């Protein structure tokens, strides 16, 4: 294996010749071997967009010569296009507020740009990771900016997927509009409803999630790019500070805004806590809906599509696997909300040292929710209703007498129910037709009447 030698303020180290990272990344690889978690590549892509914007701003203002800028731009574009993804190997649980990841991308961009200029990796006289790629930047402004960019793309994607799920549920609402069933409170039989109304309640909760998710972008648009180390903009020229946000808006296609108080935006990450809580609300709705669908399947009122064998020992058993996956996904998102809250609260003074964990948690939650919404949107259309089973519960539920109170009064309703129980009957609907009339029973227990 061939190596090149690189030097930093701590000394020298051998680097594999074939890799695009350098000594700072190599030290981080050796320092942080905590987990199998890696910084999500959608974050790396967003960080490459930030580096491209800074490069263009520095070039336009004359701080970076055009030949270097062209080579750096090409490197950034390659990363944005999904190339070089194997050159970002660092553990997500790293110390240093993300400095290792920032240096990782600086080195990859620099070494790829050096190749673009015909040089060999490690020849930083051609293009330097810090002096050129990281010019007028700090980890503390580029890293949080990149997290917000990646998160905005994520919430946009999620909003579309939530809208898709809402539409699927509303279609089921119409399909099941006339299917009578018994409602349940505290897992006990309650008053009659329709299956369509039950799905309408699911759709309503998801509709709120759709609106809340769509509004998340507003919480993420303000970025601290140009604030450098602590938000004061030290070492960054004012013309650069104003120009770089314009470049970033153009590159990302997002309505990003430069923070009026960059120190506050650098020190505090509460906007992520707000977004995480919205994601948690959506996760809780998905858990509730998925568990309800499992229960309705257990009652026999719904039939789920059969996707895979449910047991290694019980022949013919089929489980609600998609719904179980959705519940677990929701629990993970709720756990990530706790992580993000904890990370935000543990920032100290002018920065938050634990941004890598926050970035991983919020981007993971967005990915999970996008995927589980997609899965449910494919699964729910295949759910079928057992109309006869739904009607059987209605006909045999003592609680349906409640619907007749406006017609016979409370005391008479109690008396009828006692007579029914004394008779040893099981089908209350038939008993009511005998005691009152079939016409009245059909009217009272019609979907139209029950849902007015």
Image (tube, helix red, strand yellow):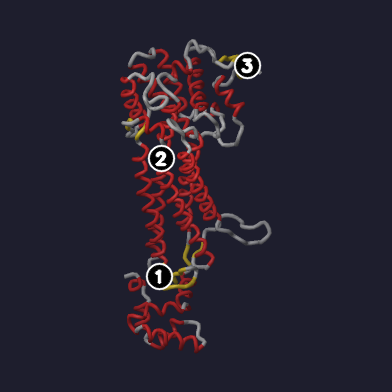
Mark 2 or 1, nearer chain start: 1
Image quadrant where residue 135 sits? top left
Q: Secondary structure at mark 2?
A: helix
* Residues at marks 3 and 1 touching, judged by CB atoms closer than 8 Å: no
Mark 2–mark 1 distance (CA, rounded to whole Å): 42 Å
Q: Position of residue 442 (x, y in %)?
A: 37, 79
Q: Residue at x 52, y 55 (%)?
A: 323
Image quadrant where residue 395 sits? bottom left
The mark found on residue 3 in the picture is 3
Q: Is residue 166 above or below residue 228?
A: below
Q: Residue at x 33, y 23 (%)?
A: 241
- Which tag is nearer the camera, tag 3 or tag 2? 2
Are there few (<14), some (14-19), or many (20+) residues within 10 Å of tag 1?
many
Q: Position of residue 232 (x, y in %)?
A: 37, 25
Q: Position of residue 255 (x, y in %)?
A: 32, 34
Are there few (<14), some (14-19), or many (20+) residues within 10 Å of tag 2?
some
Q: Which residue is mark 2?
A: 270
Q: Which residue is mark 1?
A: 193
Mark 3 or 1, nearer chain start: 3
Mark 3–mark 2 distance (CA, rounded to whole Å): 44 Å
Q: Secondary structure at mark 3?
A: strand
> Foreground: 263 or 206?
263
Q: Residue at x 44, y 28 (%)?
A: 140
């Amino acid at each position: 294996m061939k190596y090149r030698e690189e030097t930093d303020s701590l000394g020298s180290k051998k680097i594999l010749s074939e890799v695009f990272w350098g000594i700072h990344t190599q030290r981080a690889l050796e320092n942080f071997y905590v987990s199998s978690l890696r910084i999500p590549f959608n974050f790396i892509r967003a960080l490459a967009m930030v580096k491209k914007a800074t490069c263009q701003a520095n070039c336009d203002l004359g701080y970076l010569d055009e030949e270097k800028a062209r080579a750096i731009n090409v490197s950034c574009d390659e990363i944005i296009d999904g190339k070089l993804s194997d050159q970002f190997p660092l553990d997500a649980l790293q110390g240093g507020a993300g400095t290792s990841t920032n240096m990782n991308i600086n080195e990859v961009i620099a070494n790829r740009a050096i190749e673009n200029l015909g040089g060999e990796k490690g020849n930083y006289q051609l293009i330097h990771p810090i002096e050129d790629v990281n010019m007028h930047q700090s980890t503390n402004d580029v890293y949080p900016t990149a997290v917000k960019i990646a998160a905005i793309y994520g919430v946009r994607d999620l909003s579309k997927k939530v809208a898709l799920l809402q539409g699927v549920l509303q279609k089921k609402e119409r399909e099941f509009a006339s299917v009578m069933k018994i409602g349940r409170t505290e897992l006990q039989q309650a008053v009659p409803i329709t299956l369509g109304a039950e799905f309408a309640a699911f759709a309503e909760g998801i509709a709120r999630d759709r609106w809340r998710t769509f509004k998340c972008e507003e919480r993420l648009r303000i970025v601290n790019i140009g604030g450098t180390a602590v938000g004061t903009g030290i070492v960054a020229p004012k013309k650069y500070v104003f120009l770089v946000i314009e470049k970033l808006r153009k590159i990302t296609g997002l309505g990003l805004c430069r923070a009026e108080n960059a120190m506050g935006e650098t020190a505090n990450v509460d906007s992520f806590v707000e977004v995480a809580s919205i994601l948690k609300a959506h996760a809780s709705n998905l858990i509730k809906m998925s568990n309800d669908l499992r229960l309705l399947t257990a009652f026999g009122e719904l039939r789920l599509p059969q996707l895979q064998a449910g047991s290694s020992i019980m022949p013919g058993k089929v489980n609600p696997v998609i719904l179980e996956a959705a519940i677990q996904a929701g629990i993970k998102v709720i756990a990530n909300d706790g992580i993000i809250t904890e990370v935000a609260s543990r920032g100290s003074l002018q920065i938050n040292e634990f941004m890598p964990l926050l970035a991983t948690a919020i981007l993971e939650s967005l990915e999970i929710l996008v995927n589980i919404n997609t899965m449910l949107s494919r699964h729910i259309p295949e759910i079928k209703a057992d109309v006869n089973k739904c009607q059987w519960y209605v006909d045999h539920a003592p609680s349906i007498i409640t619907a007749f109170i406006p017609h016979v009064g409370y005391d008479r309703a109690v008396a009828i129910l006692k007579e029914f129980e004394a008779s040893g009957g099981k089908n209350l609907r038939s008993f009511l037709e005998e005691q009152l009339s079939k016409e009245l029973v059909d009217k009272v227990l019609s979907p139209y009447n029950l849902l007015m």
